[in-house]
Amino acid sequence: MKRYSKYLLPGGLFFLILWGGMVVCRIDPILLLKGIPQGIKLFGYMIPPAWEKMPELVKPALETLQIAFVGTALGACFSFLIGLIAARNIHSFRLLRDVTRALLSAERALPDLIVMLFFVAIVGFGAFPGVMALMASSIGMLGKLFADAIEEVDPKPIESLEAIGATKIQVIHYAILPQVLPSLIANTLYRFEVNIRMSVLLGVVGAGGIGYSLVTSMRLLKYQESMGAILIILLLVIFCEKSAELFRKVMIGQELLK
Amino acid sequence: MLTLKNISKKLPDGRLLLKDISFHVQKGEFVGILGESGVGKTVLLRCINGLTRPDRGEVILDGDGIPQKINGKKGKELRTIRRKIGMIFQGSILVKRLTVLENVLTGGLGRISTVRSLVYGFTDKEVDQALRALDQVGIRSLAHRRAETLSGGEMQRVAIARAIFQEPHLLLADEPVSNLDPKNTEVVLDFLKPLTKQMAIVGVFHAPKLVSKYCTRIIGIRDGLVVYDGSPELDDTALNLIYGTKDRSLKEMAN
């Protein structure tokens, strides 16, 4: 009995907090069970999907894809520059580096939807604030990852190029970029997969695209159209993940051949 | 060609590593710097091209007939002088993920502008020249292999090809063969030696036996001073001067 007594206090505390949380959140399994018929009814309204409306959804789907693509691409480019500023081995302005790192952390601490609301407040609704929000949140993550990758490169080639009179940009181009490129590509592809989902979600809060089509049809109670939008979102996300996977394979394949 | 005047350098902990080093190197010389490990040979070499800043003294390079002071220079001026000084390090300096040819081409970065290196890089003529440099060290067939697939000896030969392509007046070699087996050591030094026709070579070595065969002159450093400067044929007196008599093992290494 004594062996378990030390778990009594933390264990009891944990269950107390859990119970309290459940009360506050009004966890009610009965309500969930009671809701099942309602759920089935809603699903019934959605079937069959509005096939005839699906072609109209292709354009918003492409818009969602474009928001994700442009946001990721711009984010990755800026992240490389910011990564250079945030890395310890590129320059000797410590304050600049620390401030950059702190800003990147602050960005990561902000939920993406809040970033989106911020950009909506400045530039209004549409794809543009969506792209900006995705770019900002991509920079928060990729900027840090790129900076870490840059810090881990082999320092000898860098010094050897500095020793023969190469400029800073030449050193970055010939000694640093080749070393970090695989990590840049892998992380950017991963971020693209995150961003395509985010892009759908941002559509719901005003970035347009397929997310907006989905929420509009739900509000108008056109559930069959909603089902069409959900199917298209599924296809879009799967398509993007498969493309990223293929691209990754092609890149690694080239690595092995060389 | 190269003149060092009264170089001194303190370590961060305040110890005076190099007290007062002066010597002059002519074109065509292959100077070997010897000394016990920790005596500051590498620091001295790095003072020459400004990778380390000496506390006092002057380093003057006179390649085109215009003497230029190296230490104290910064930015563009420093880069301009560094173009004329090649450097080979201990171990590999190659960018492992670039090809052998690309690594050789980086030797010419000092010559071309940043904008050009970003926009189109090197011309066909320069690529031919780089291939000839690889020919000179006998590894042209490896030109399109990735640097990471090479052996240690091959990597050091690429580093030499890079220095040939750079066309410097002076080549600094920081223990270029200390990571290599005896056979590769000879191969690398055999490729290094003929370069003295175009440039002066100053190298740091830790095996005295080796250097007499390749160097034209030895400079021995001990306690921060030049204690020997002369013929590469080192007799016992010379070895005692450089390494001291107390340490038997070092003398044995020499024989």
Image (cartoon, helix red, strand yellow):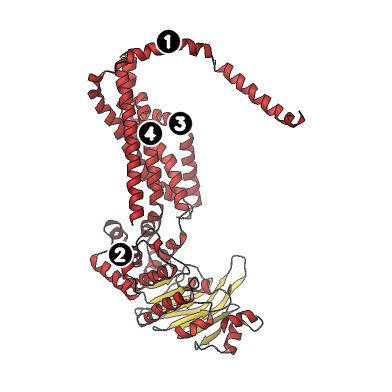
How many other residues sit within 10 Å of disc 3, few (<14), some (14-19) or many (≥20)? few
Residue that carries the numbered disc 2 in the rendered image:
B112
Task: Determine whether A36 is above or below B231 in the image.
Answer: above
Judge if badges 4 and 2 mark residues of a common chain: no
Q: Which of the pair A12/B44 is nearer the observer? A: A12
Across the whole image, how many numbered discs are drawn on residues?
4
Foreground: A192 or A86?
Answer: A192
Distance from the alpha carbon under mark 4 to that under mark 2:
40 Å
> Which mark is nearer the camera, 1 or 3?
1
Q: Earlier in the sequence, mark 1 or mark 4?
A: 1
Q: Dot 3: what SS?
A: loop
Task: State how far apart marks 1 and 4 are (Cα).
Answer: 39 Å
Q: Are marks 3 and 4 on the same chain?
A: yes
Tag 2's secondary structure?
A: loop
Q: Position of residue B69 (x, y in %)?
A: 43, 74
The Cα atoms of the two marked residues, 1 and 3, are separated by 34 Å
Instruction: Nearest to the eye among marks 2 and 1: give it.
Output: 1
- Tell me the kind of residue under disc 3: Pro
Rendered image: mark on residue A37: 1
Q: Answer above or below: position of A151 versus A144.
A: below
Q: What residue sits right under mark 4 in the picture?
A: A133
Query: Which chain does the residue under circle 1 lie in?
Result: A
Quarter of the image for the N terminus of chain A: give it: top right
Q: Is residue A125 visible?
A: no
